[in-house]
Image: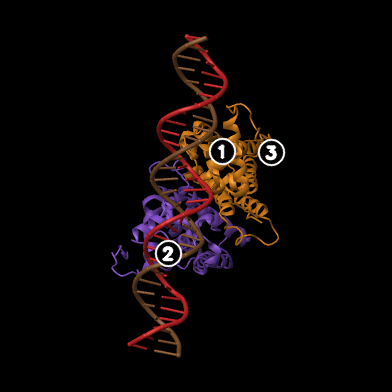
Chain colours: A orange, B purple, C brown, D red
Amino acid sequence: MPKAKTPRRTSYHHGNLREVLIDAAVQLVEEGGSDNVSVREAAKRAGVSPGAPFRHFANKTALMTAVAEQAMSRFRSEITNAVENVATDNPIARFAAVGIAYLRWAIRNPTHFQIISTRSLIDWDSSESLRRDNEAVRALVEGSMVEAQQRHLLRSNDIAETQIAARALVYGLARMYIDGHFAQWAVAGHTAEQTAQNVLKHFVTLIGNDGSKGD
Amino acid sequence: MPKAKTPRRTSYHHGNLREVLIDAAVQLVEEGGSDNVSVREAAKRAGVSPGAPFRHFANKTALMTAVAEQAMSRFRSEITNAVENVATDNPIARFAAVGIAYLRWAIRNPTHFQIISTRSLIDWDSSESLRRDNEAVRALVEGSMVEAQQRHLLRSNDIAETQIAARALVYGLARMYIDGHFAQWAVAGHTAEQTAQNVLKHFVTLIGNDGSKGD
DNA sequence: CAATAATGTAATCACTGTTTACAACTTATG
DNA sequence: CATAAGTTGTAAACAGTGATTACATTATTG
């Protein structure tokens, strides 16, 4: 983890303000969620006046978007890594690996997941990198689904609907956790992460064509 | 729809302030989402000073919680009505009816759905009525699931996981729409509501034990 | 070196949630 | 009925917010 502490600059110019502001915002997010971020506090932590951030970010949303870009990049690489480390070449197992890595990251980084998925916090349209990373994850899912269908491993032929269902299931599990609607559904003796993974595996069994009836 | 316009009161006391503040907050939500709500603006629209609302609500969250209670009540009755109007007594059809009514309401009332489902906006713990309405919906789902299992209509025997999967799917579809992640998944020529319903039906087919392979 | 662009500061604006001292009205009680 | 005790409003203030503006300082470059 790269540390970029306030460097008590002596020169008038900061030299590194953009990055330090993003780091400060990330820190604030981790301390108290996205609501805890204020441009002024980020500026204060960077050792700079309240107006300075606006030389680097058009508005608060732009700062939050930069935070989201960082988070999204980590999110994507965690998923990409997970899929590359899958032993089998079974596309359904590959899809499951994506989902499990997705849920793992979301549950371990709830506030960051909230930021990258909540529209009102960031300016999705303005960020090339956000769209690119998001598309990469989507393509991973689609690729494994298409291959699964070609190998006749899917129960249904409507791949589009299966894909949206898969996305909605994973997104829903992550969001339920983030929004605090998980405690009431949690299975006794299991962590949220375990429960989410089990439900995902359950779903994977459901869409599969192996004739199994689940557990 | 009950109208409670600002009544240009002549007396010192308002007489109806609590309800009028809630209505004003609802109006603000409908005009610009939950971010558009401010206690001061609600007070202004009620024709009252900025401090007055705090005689009726401990803080802004309490006001938003009251808004959420209203919304949740409508949400619940829409779902309850839908389930009562289901012709067949097939529990899986009943579950589908719950899901469809759920999605229908969420997509047609996106900002209100956002309020009732986003934890940071409201004080869920303090509201008896929120918990009661939420539990009622949950019980509807559980009831139909249990009955489906008893009649051997489900593919899997792990009813808890099937139930969480169902909840996550529906919640995920609704949240994807609210969070703006639906455009990229939408099926051409279909509205969001149609797509969501089709995906739900797809899921219902998947969990069913009728040997069908979906479409 | 001088002109120019980039990046900081200080002051200010309008707005927010919330609190406090006080005023007006309503209700319960002697 | 009078008066004491709530209840519910107002006015003024506070600290915090995002954002803009005029200005100062520094870096870059012709």
Which of the chains bears the disc numbered 2?
B
Q: Can residue B181 be seen in this view?
A: no
Q: Which of marks 3 and 1 is nearer the N terminus?
A: 1
Q: Name the element at disc 2.
A: helix
Q: What residue type is labelled 1?
A: Ala
Of B186 and C13, the residue lying toward us: C13
Can you tell which mark lies on residue B102? none
The x, y position of residue B91, in whole percent, is: 50, 65
Cα distance between the residues tagged 2 and 3 = 48 Å
Q: Which of marks 2 and 3 is in front?
A: 2
Across the whole image, how many numbered discs are drawn on residues?
Answer: 3
Q: Mark 3 points at which residue?
A: A86
Q: Name the element at disc 3.
A: loop
Can you tell which mark lies on residue B70? 2
Q: What residue type is labelled 3?
A: Val
Taking the image as shown, residue A90 lies to the left or right of residue B104, namely right
Cα distance between the residues tagged 3 and 1 = 43 Å
Of A127 and B187, the residue lying toward us: A127
The x, y position of residue B205, in whole percent, is: 51, 54
Q: Which amino acid does label 2 sit on?
A: Gln
Q: Mark 1 points at which residue?
A: A43
Which of the chains bears the disc numbered 3?
A
Taking the image as shown, residue B87 lies to the left or right of residue A113, namely left
Q: Which residue is drawn at 42% across and 69% down?
A: B84
Name above or below for residue A122 compared with residue C30. above
Name above or below for residue A75 compared with residue B66. above
